[in-house]
Amino acid sequence: MNRHAMSPVDAAWFHMDGPDNPAIVTAVAITRRPLDIARVRRDFTRRVLRFDRFRQRVVESGFGFATPLWEDVPDLDIAMHVRHVALPDPGDEEALRTLVEDLASQPLERDRPLWQAHVVDNVNAGGALVMRYHHCIGDGRAMMHVAARLFGMPRTAARRGARAQRMISPPPSLVEAAMTLAGEAGAILSDLAKPSDSTSPFKGEFGPRKSVAWSTPVPIEDVKAIGAPIGAKVNDVLVAAVAGALRSYLRRRGTDPTRMTMRAMVPIDLRPPQDTTQLGNEFGLVILDLPVCAATWTARLAQTKASMDTLKHSAEAPGIRLLLDLFGRGPKALEDIACEIFGSKASLVLTNVIGPAETIRLAGVPVDRLAFCVPHPGDRIGMGVSILSYRGSVTLTVIADAGLVPDPHRITQAFNREVAAMIRQTGRRRLAAPHAAAPAPAGG
């Protein structure tokens, strides 16, 4: 049976699971017409199973001291991985959100490849696909390449990446990684010296149940207009709006945001520009201070821009990437130590992924909405906040421990209100979300 070793960084993410908090990404695609389950399974078989990690399970030996292995699964049954469900009446977006919560609260079966998809019927007279996969399979940029195959997107970028594969350097040896890590030690020591993040509703004891909500789409042109007067980028504006939404939520929960720090673990893509086809994880992490203490959105935007500008020149992301490389070469106990140390410094994971600019199709049906939930693995960080762009707009999604954050729709609604206020105060007439009218926020 064909086996090969998992890369150290992917092994680190495989071991990052907490007892009630696995490192599983959940993605949602909503369509206005029902999906044909037979055609979806056919497309997964022809387009997704071509990637070997979707045909392989993870096996461990050596009592957890050896690197995990990818092992081929012969005669994989696609029906066990692409399942068919229907929402109960009235089949609205709230029912879909509840299903996503139910699925996100369940672990994946370790004796099979670590992914699963559900074709959902009766979603506002249309359908949906809910796909879950373990982070050890790949990061956001890698999985966008998988999505490009599944949705039949243009292959130009994939061909460029395939031509560039020979120029990609091999993973560093243990000695090389340690030597490089020593050069980044200052940035890492600076992170370790930070005090623990303030007590907040996002920290506490975890349970297995997840809560999920997503926002209405926000036009990217509006976001650009908000940031233009001070030269702020789209990311700056979106992060500032998240900070404003969290500030509003904290106040609603009886927490004074003016007397606290709140930080986010933010993934930073470290792939070479030409590397678009490799699966796996090639990103670092930075710890970003969120200006929840600032009373106005202009102050939050200015502080966010300053922090983001500083991080662009920081050695923090490659340093933590190499630290994961080192930890991934040892037993799970090392990753547990990393989660404990770095998890104490932040309250949430915050990520932004660039999705397709044009309408994509799933099994021949146009996809109306896209969203995804970033995991917040370990047992210290209680919430993941993700932003995904699609067809000229962005959607914010929150996944959290349901015992800590039972009402994540309050955060997504506050995000939409924050952006609306920013647009209004810049004097710009608010645009409708491109291509489609925005439905009501899930969970609202």
Image (cartoon, rainbow, N blue to C red):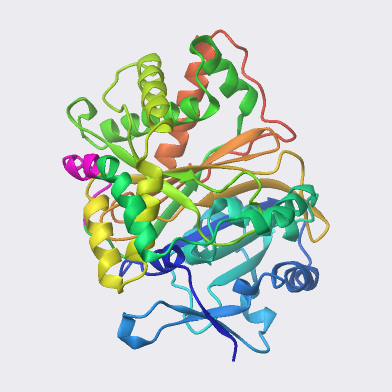
Judge whether residue 244 is colored magenta: no
Residue 346 location (% of width, % of height): 28, 44
Q: Between 242 and 46, which is closer to the camera in this rendering?
A: 46
Q: Residue at x 45, y 24 (%)?
A: 418
Q: Between 139 and 198, which is closer to the camera in this rendering?
A: 139
Q: Residue at x 80, y 49 (%)?
A: 154
Is residue 443 left or right of 61 when viewed as pictured? right
Q: In this orientation, does residue 124 appear?
A: no
Q: Between 106 and 276, which is closer to the camera in this rendering?
A: 276
Q: How many marks?
A: 0
Location of the N terminus (image quadrant):
bottom right
The magenta segment is: 189-204
Q: Residue at x 46, y 80 (%)?
A: 110
Furthest residue toward right: 364
Q: Between 62 and 423, which is closer to the camera in this rendering?
A: 62
Q: In this orientation, does residue 442 appear?
A: yes
Residue 274 location (% of width, % of height): 66, 47
Give the quarter of the image for residue 394. Answer: top right
**Dominant secondary structure of the residues highlighted in magenta in the image:** loop
Give the quarter of the image for residue 78. Answer: bottom right
Residue 121 location (% of width, % of height): 69, 63
Please say if 331 is above or below 425: below
Is residue 52 left or right of 149 when viewed as pictured? left
Residue 59 location (% of width, % of height): 46, 83
Furthest residue toward bottom: 1
Please say if 110 is above or below 436: below
